[in-house]
Image: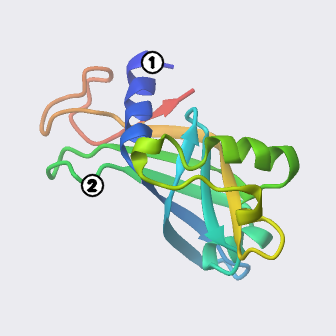
């Protein structure tokens, strides 16, 4: 894995508060949802959602997900994005304890920490984790210029190993 690309991916995760979560319902219809998230490393993404949200219901029957984290503040043709695929589900037991340590991320992001009671029992909320099996970044480059790593003057993704 290129250290430059991993640093680029980490910067995207550190500076963006929302990811786009793609799920699929039992009939195969896709659904995307923006969710506030916190990441652990480059392959674990945590969020809290109501259990009756469409994406939460979808995960009960089809745990496969797609994820995009992108910087919407950049100028056109200066795209910065991380893409991932993997599986996701609600957390329990030791996984929940770990998730509560990670979510909602650093305090300077402005979110409030959750307790076990906030996401268990009769609460309508649960803490979820997606574990990515594959991760890519949109290779950073200036418009109409080749990227320094691959020499390609077009948008392309680079896999993070």
Q: Which mark is residue 2?
A: 1
Task: Count all numbered tags in the image, as a single digit.
Answer: 2
Q: Residue at x 87, y 50 (%)?
A: 93
Relative to 14, 32 lies left or right: right
The C terminus appears in which quarter of the rendering? top right
Percent position of residue 36, x then y: 49, 58
Res 39 quadrant in image: top right
Res 21 quadrant in image: bottom right
Q: Nearer the viewer, residue 43 or 79?
A: 43
Res 15 quadrant in image: top left
Percent position of residue 61, x then y: 79, 72
How packed mark 2 is, by other alpha carbons closer than 10 Å (few <14, some 14-19, many 20 or more), is few
Q: Which mark is residue 137?
A: none
Q: Nearer the viewer, residue 144 or 134?
A: 134
Relative to 19, 154 lies left or right: left
Q: Which mark is residue 72?
A: 2
Label 2: state its secondary structure.
loop
Percent position of residue 20, x then y: 47, 61
Label 1: state its secondary structure.
loop
Relative to 95, 82 lies left or right: left
Q: Residue at x 69, y 57 (%)?
A: 128
Q: Nearer the viewer, mark 1 or mark 2?
A: 2
Percent position of residue 70, x then y: 36, 50
Q: Residue at x 57, y 56 (%)?
A: 66
How packed mark 1 is, by other alpha carbons closer than 10 Å (few <14, some 14-19, many 20 or more), is few
Give above or below for 150 relative to 107.
above
Q: Marks 1/2: CA distance?
A: 24 Å
**Colour scheme:** rainbow
Q: Earlier in the sequence, mark 1 or mark 2?
A: 1
Q: Nearer the viewer, residue 146 or 9?
A: 9
């Amino acid at each position: 894995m290129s250290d430059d690309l991993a640093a680029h991916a980490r910067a995207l995760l550190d500076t963006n508060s929302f990811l786009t979560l793609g799920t699929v319902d039992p009939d195969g219809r896709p659904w995307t949802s923006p969710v506030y998230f916190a990441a652990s490393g480059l392959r674990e993404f945590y969020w809290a959602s109501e259990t009756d949200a469409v994406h939460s219901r979808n995960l009960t029957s089809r745990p496969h997900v797609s994820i995009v984290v992108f910087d919407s503040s950049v100028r056109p043709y200066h795209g910065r994005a991380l893409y991932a695929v993997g599986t996701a589900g609600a957390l329990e037991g030791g996984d929940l304890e770990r998730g509560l340590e990670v979510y909602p991320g650093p305090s300077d992001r402005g979110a409030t920490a959750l307790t076990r009671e906030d996401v268990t029992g009769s609460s309508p909320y649960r803490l979820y984790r997606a574990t990515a099996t594959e991760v890519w970044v949109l290779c950073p480059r200036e418009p109409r210029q080749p990227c320094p790593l691959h020499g390609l003057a077009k948008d392309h993704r680079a896999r993070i190993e």
